[in-house]
């Protein structure tokens, strides 16, 4: 858990995760997040990296956070710094991975015995308990309440926010001729108790399929050894930049 005590010496490393490093900014309630070149899957059992990944993911995440802000979705993003850094509002992360699915793929498709690629009539929101030691297990609303992770009102707020984020992301990616299959987001509370969208939205935590060819443009290329990982991440950024600027 990150705890900067409000203010820490600029540049102090507060947390190193699988894809990012979090530093104190020297300013109260503000952090600097560095996007690393490393890449992990299956709860870090599989490890890799590629050149320029940090830069690509920082740029994709910042573009998406800015577009979401335009739609009234508050996020931790404040500004970009250098090539791989993002200046953000510090939050206390709510330990839930909030997943939205438009098309079934991955663990839920497998668990329910439904073929990957099944388009859902209504987007599905799921919660997973963010805990590496437990391998991020699925949790029900009642389990979230039982563990005191969020209140009933907060659960409903998270679901509503997730649906709203999905609508906006779906639209943005569609313009870039990409199908948003599913994604994972994290939320946190700032020092005033406001819920903000935090962490990252990148091909590491989204499934993105080319609309025409159905080709995967996301971390599944790494999980499933499909090759061209770097090229796919670059392609996502290139298309978003081309359409959003
Ligand atoms: N605005 C923020 N304030 C505090 N912590 C954050 C913020 N945004 C993201 N985080 C946390 O910082 C860490 C980012 O590093 P990452 O490499 O993604 O970690 P992990 O390996 O735990 O997924 C995560 O634990 C994430 O929840
Ligand atoms: Mg992470």
Image (tube, rainbow, N blue to C red):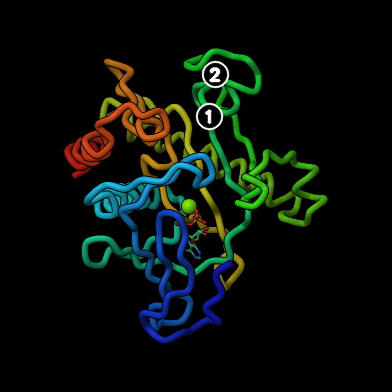
Q: Residue at x 36, y 31 (%)?
A: 171
Q: Secondary structure at mark 2?
A: strand
Q: Is residue 243 left or right of residue 98?
A: left
Q: Give x and y (percent) for residue 163.
A: 54, 37
Which quadrant holds the N terminus? bottom right
Residue topped by disc 1 = 101
The disc placed on residue 120 is: 2
In the image, residue 26 sits, relative to residue 85, either above or below, namely below
Q: How many marks?
A: 2
Furthest toward the right, the residue is 146
Q: Residue at x 75, y 48 (%)?
A: 144
Q: Is residue 23 left or right of residue 116?
A: left
Of mark 1 and mark 2, the one earlier in the sequence is 1
Judge by depth and name the residue closer to the eye, 172 or 85: 85
Ligand 2 closer than 8 Å to the CB at disc 2?
A: no
Q: Is residue 10 left or right of residue 124?
A: left
Ligand 2 closer than 8 Å to the CB at disc 1?
A: no
CA–CA distance between discs 1 and 2?
8 Å
Packing grade of label 1 (10 A; few <14, some 14-19, many >=20) is many
Q: Residue at x 54, y 34 (%)?
A: 100
Which quadrant holds the C terminus? top left
Q: Secondary structure at mark 1?
A: strand
The disc placed on residue 198 is: none
Packing grade of label 2 (10 A; few <14, some 14-19, many >=20) is few
Q: Give x and y (percent) for residue 170.
A: 40, 31
Tell whether label 2 touches label 1 (CB within 8 Å): yes
Q: Give x and y (percent) for residue 107.
A: 58, 28
Residue 238 occupies quadrant: top left
Q: Residue at x 49, y 22 (%)?
A: 103
Judge by depth and name the residue closer to the eye, 167 or 59: 59
In the image, residue 58 sits, relative to residue 222, either above or below, namely below
In the image, residue 225 sits, relative to residue 131, either above or below, namely above
């Amino acid at each position: 858990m990150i705890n900067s005590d409000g203010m820490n010496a600029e540049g102090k490393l507060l947390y190193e995760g699988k894809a990012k490093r979090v530093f104190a900014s020297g300013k109260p309630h503000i952090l600097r997040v560095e996007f690393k070149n490393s890449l992990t899957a299956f709860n870090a059992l599989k490890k890799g990296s590629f050149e320029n990944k940090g830069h690509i993911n920082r740029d994709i995440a910042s573009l998406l956070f800015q577009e979401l802000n335009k739609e009234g979705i508050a996020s931790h993003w404040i500004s970009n710094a250098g090539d791989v850094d993002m200046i953000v509002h510090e939050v206390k992360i709510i330990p839930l991975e909030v997943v939205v699915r438009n098309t079934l793929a991955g663990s839920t498709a497998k668990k329910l015995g439904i073929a990957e690629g099944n388009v859902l009539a209504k987007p599905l929101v799921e919660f997973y308990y963010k805990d590496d030691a437990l391998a991020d297990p699925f949790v029900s609303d009642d389990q979230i309440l039982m563990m005191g992770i969020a209140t009933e009102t907060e659960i409903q707020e998270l679901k509503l926010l997730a649906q709203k984020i999905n609508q906006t992301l779906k639209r943005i990616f569609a313009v870039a001729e990409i199908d948003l299959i599913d994604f994972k987001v994290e939320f946190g509370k700032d020092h005033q108790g406001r819920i903000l969208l935090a962490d990252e939205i990148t091909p590491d935590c989204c499934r993105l399929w080319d609309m025409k060819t159905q080709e995967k443009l996301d971390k599944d290329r790494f999980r499933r050894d499909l090759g061209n990982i770097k090229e796919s991440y670059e392609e996502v950024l290139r298309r978003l930049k081309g359409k959003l600027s």
